[in-house]
Image (cartoon, rainbow, N blue to C red):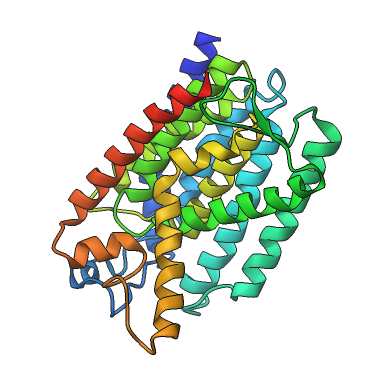
């Protein structure tokens, strides 16, 4: 098992590093560059034209690595499916935005409907072809599970789609979503190994792929993951959590995702209720800190440190 873990991390990392210098120039030649909002932080304007859709790198690395382990570890199949399904939705959104030059990408209802469909297939597979229970392990209480009965499925849809979009909102600074999620993937890898869940090859592959991707995504980024990567990572986090009956742990290890999506919701609601007033200088919340004077690298560092500490707290709540 130790060999499997090491191989999955190193292979995925290696594939990501090798493909980076091939995929990034290809994306640049396709002119799939990021368009930065004028109302955003002024420091972001220089990012205009930076290749996006770099999430393809992450997905390719994870899929290539997982092929070697799927026969012995069939539990990685639903995790891969949800990750690829959400990644494809993100790819369509990115493609429409950067190739068709339609700034909004997929319409909100189109993106939501596609997420419903992909999540529906995931829950069908989970309930029909696996013995994974939808009851959720309660952190810090041994052998205690939260079971909503028939409501488990609606709750699953809420958790999966909420996590996917929370991760998507986190992707706004160089290396932010990558740094936060590599820590979350590491947490799930440790939990998977300790629980013997059998999904550690894919959780380790995601960690390795993100470490490789960070070489190109840290400030100043030479590529962005786009919705292709951020939605895929959200799908991965939700799927990995459900395969180990740990969706409640997302609230802890994915606190940054939660803070990002809540900041957007609060900003929109408050703006409408007060006729134009704002709680934050800009949402998602990472932009608020930037406009408060924090350098981009500081925001990424602080958010990553918070995630690392919460992952340690969550580990204490597993056993």
Furthest residue in direction bottom, as rendered: 275
Q: Is residue 175 above or below residue 293?
A: above
Residue 283 coordinates in the image, percent (x, y): 35, 68
Q: Is residue 117 above or below residue 136?
A: below
Residue 195 coordinates in the image, percent (x, y): 59, 17
**Residue in the foreground of this view, choosing between 63 and 297:** 297
Please say whether residue 80 is visible from this viewpoint.
yes
Name the side, left or right, on which 126 lies relative to 318. Answer: right
The quarter of the picture where the N terminus appears is: top right
Furthest residue in direction top, as rendered: 2
**Residue in the foreground of this view, choosing between 223 and 141:** 141
- Residue visible at 19% across and 68% down in the picture: 291
- Residue visible at 24% across and 67% down in the picture: 44
Residue 85 coordinates in the image, percent (x, y): 65, 51
**Residue in the foreground of this view, choosing between 250 and 217:** 250
- Residue visible at 44% across and 84% down in the picture: 273
Q: Is residue 87 above or below residue 279?
A: above
**Residue in the foreground of this view, choosing between 107 and 243:** 243
Task: Report the number of discs.
Answer: 0
Name the side, left or right, on which 73 lies relative to 162. Answer: right
Please say whether residue 54 is visible from this viewpoint.
no
Give the quarter of the image for residue 282: bottom left
Residue 235 coordinates in the image, percent (x, y): 59, 47
- Residue visible at 55% across and 67% down in the picture: 93
């Amino acid at each position: 098992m130790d060999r499997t873990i090491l191989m999955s991390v190193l292979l995925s990392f290696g594939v990501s590093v090798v493909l980076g210098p091939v995929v990034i120039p290809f994306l640049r030649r396709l002119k799939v560059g990021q368009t930065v909002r004028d109302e955003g932080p002024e420091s972001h304007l220089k990012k205009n034209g930076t290749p996006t859709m770099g999430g393809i790198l992450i997905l390719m690395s994870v899929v290539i690595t997982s092929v070697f382990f799927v026969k012995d570890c069939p539990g990685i199949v639903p995790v891969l499916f949800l990750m690829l399904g959400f990644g494809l939705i993100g790819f369509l959104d990115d493609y429409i935005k950067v190739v068709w030059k339609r700034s909004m990408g997929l319409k909100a209802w189109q993106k939501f409907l596609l997420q419903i469909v992909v999540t529906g297939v995931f829950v069908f597979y989970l309930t029909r072809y696996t013995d994974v229970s939808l009851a959720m392990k309660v952190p810090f209480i041994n052998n205690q599970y939260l079971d909503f009965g028939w409501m488990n499925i609606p709750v699953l849809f809420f958790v999966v789609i909420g996590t996917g979009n929370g991760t998507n909102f986190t992707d706004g600074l160089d290396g932010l979503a990558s740094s936060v999620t590599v820590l979350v993937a590491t947490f799930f890898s440790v939990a998977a190994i300790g629980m013997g869940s059998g999904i550690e090859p894919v959780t380790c592959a995601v960690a390795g792929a993100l470490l490789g991707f960070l070489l190109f995504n840290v400030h100043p980024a030479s590529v962005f993951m786009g919705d292709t990567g951020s939605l895929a990572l959200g799908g991965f986090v939700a799927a990995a959590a459900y395969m180990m009956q740990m969706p409640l742990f997302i609230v802890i290890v994915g606190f940054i995702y939660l803070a990002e999506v809540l900041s957007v919701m609060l900003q929109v609601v408050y703006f409408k209720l007060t006729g134009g007033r704002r709680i934050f200088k800009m949402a998602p919340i990472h932009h608020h800190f930037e406009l408060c004077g924090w350098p981009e690298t500081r925001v990424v560092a602080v958010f990553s440190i918070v995630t690392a500490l919460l992952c340690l707290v969550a580990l204490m709540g597993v056993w």
